[in-house]
Amino acid sequence: MTLKGRLEARQGDITRMAVDAIVNAANTSLLGGGGVDGAIHRAAGPELLAECRTIGGCPTGEARLTKGYRLPARHVIHTVGPVYRGRPEDSRLLAGCYTHSLTLAMDHGLQTLAFPAISCGVYGYPIADACRIAVDSCATFMGSHDTPDRVVFVLFSAAYLDVYTRPLSFRVA
Ligand code: AR6
C-alpha cells in the first residue's frame, strides 16, 4: 500500500490540529504534566482530566483513548513513552507507543492522526533515534493496513522538523 500523501511532517502546535485524534506524550498516571501533555490538557479543558481519572493510568509503551473536548481534534490518544536510559527496551517501548496508538485508531475508525515527538522532551530520547523509530513504526503499520488515511508528525521546532525530512523521504516514495 502506498504511503504517498499518507505520512508527512510539519512544524506546529499539535493542540491546533483538527484531526480525528492527536496523540499525547503522557506519563503513566495519565493525570497531566508539563510539555505537550500540559498544553493538551489546557486546550481541552478540565473534562479531559476528569475522563483520564476514570482510566486508572497506562503502562509505558501502551495507549488509551479519550474524547477531545474543547480541542479541534475529536479524540486524544494518550501514550506513555519511555524515559531514555540507553537500554535496548527503550526502542521497543517507543515503537510500542506508535503501534499501539495506530491500532487504537484503527479499532475506533479514526482516519487522521497527529503525533508529537514522543519522549523527546523531558524524557530525553535523542531526536534522531526517536525519529527513525517513529517513521519506521508508522510506515510499517500503514504499509500493511489501509487505515489510518493520514498521519502527521507535528514538531514544535524547525530543527526537529529537519530531522524528520530524510527518514520520511526514504519511506514515502
Ligand atoms: N505541539 C507539538 N509538540 C510539542 C508541544 C505542542 N504544543 N509542546 C511540546 N511539544 P514532552 P516527553 C514537543 O516533554 O519527553 C510531561 O510532563 C516538545 O518540544 O512534552 O514524552 C508528561 O506528563 C518535545 O519535542 O514529552 C510526562 O511526564 C515533544 O513535544 C513527560 O512530560 C515531547 O516533549 C513526557 O515526556
Image (cartoon, grey):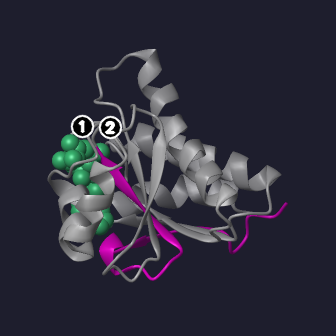
Residue corresponding to mark 1: 123
Residue 67 visible: yes
What is the magenta range?
1-26
Residue 64 % position (x, y): 46, 49
Disc 1 beta carbon < 8 A from ligand 1? Answer: yes
Quarter of the image where the N terminus is located: bottom right
Q: CA distance from mark 1 to mark 2?
A: 9 Å
* The image quarter in which residue 4 lies: bottom right
Residue 31 % position (x, y): 22, 49
Determine crowd level at label 1: few under 14, some 14-19, many 20+ residues with C-alpha closer than 10 A.
some
Residue corresponding to mark 2: 126
Q: Kindly identify the residue that appears in the image at 29 percent across and 65 percent down.
A: 48
Residue 37 % position (x, y): 24, 57
Helix, strand or loop at mark 1: loop
Q: Kindly identify the residue that appears in the image at 45 percent across and 83 percent down.
A: 18
Extreme residue toward the right, this view: 1
Residue 101 % position (x, y): 54, 50
Amino acid carrying label 2: it is Pro
Q: Are marks 1 and 2 in contact (CB under 8 Å)?
A: no
Does 106 sit left or right of 1 as displayed? Answer: left
Q: Kindly identify the residue that appears in the image at 46 percent across and 69 percent down.
A: 75
* The image quarter in which residue 90 lies: top left
The correct choice, above or below, for 126 with respect to 112 in the image is: above
Q: Of discs 1 and 2, which sits in the foreground?
A: 1
Determine crowd level at label 2: few under 14, some 14-19, many 20+ residues with C-alpha closer than 10 A.
few
Residue 156 visible: no
Disc 2 beta carbon < 8 A from ligand 1? Answer: no
Q: Is residue 43 magenta?
A: no
The correct choice, above or below, for 144 with respect to 50 in the image is: above
Amino acid carrying label 1: it is Tyr
Extreme residue toward the front, this view: 54
Q: Relative to the observer, which residue lies in front, 66 or 80?
A: 66
